[in-house]
Image (cartoon, helix red, strand yellow):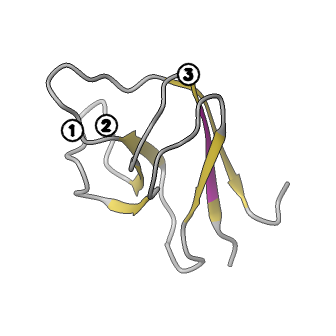
């Protein structure tokens, strides 16, 4: 089984964000932080850098990808580019 690899290019510095997989349509039910199958990026993403996270091969099959960061009231998450690939398929 292949792993899912999620790559982000952020225009704002991200830290400790989570990438999640779900079959629940986020347009119907907004995702709740860490209440889905997820992996967490540990650390601060350097400015203008690409960050990657991988799910284990036995993660299952999902339809939607969620990228979230735990926010303060004044924070926002701004992502320039998200790429989802199956490892070994690119």
Q: Residues within 10 Å of mark 1 (few under 14, many from 20)?
A: few
- The image position of residue 23, as x and y in percent, is 38, 53
Q: Quadrant of the rendered structure where residue 89 is?
A: bottom right
Disc ID at residue 29: 1
- The image position of residue 84, as x and y in percent, is 64, 47
Q: Is residue 57 left or right of residue 41?
A: right
Residue pictured at 31% horizontal, 48% vertical: 24
- The residue beneath circle 3 is 11
Residue pictured at 29% horizontal, 59% vertical: 36
Disc 1 and disc 2: Cα gap in Å?
5 Å
- The residue beneath circle 2 is 26
Upstream in sequence: badge 3 or badge 1: 3
Under circle 2, the secondary element is loop
Residue pictured at 55% horizontal, 22% vertical: 11
Q: Which residues are magenta?
A: 5-9
Which residue appears farthest toward the right when viewing the image?
A: 90
**Callout 3 touching callout 1 (CB < 8 Å):** no
Q: Residues within 10 Å of mark 3 (few under 14, many from 20)?
A: some
Residue pictured at 68% horizontal, 79% vertical: 1
């Amino acid at each position: 089984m292949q792993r899912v690899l999620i790559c982000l290019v952020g225009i704002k510095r991200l830290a400790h964000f989570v990438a999640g997989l779900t079959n629940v349509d986020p347009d119907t039910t907004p995702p709740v932080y860490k209440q889905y199958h997820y992996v967490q990026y540990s650390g601060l993403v350097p400015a203008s850098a690409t960050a990657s996270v991988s799910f284990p091969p036995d993660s299952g099959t999902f339809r939607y990808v969620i990228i979230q960061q735990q926010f303060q009231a004044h924070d926002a998450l701004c992502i320039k580019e998200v790429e989802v690939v199956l490892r070994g398929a690119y």
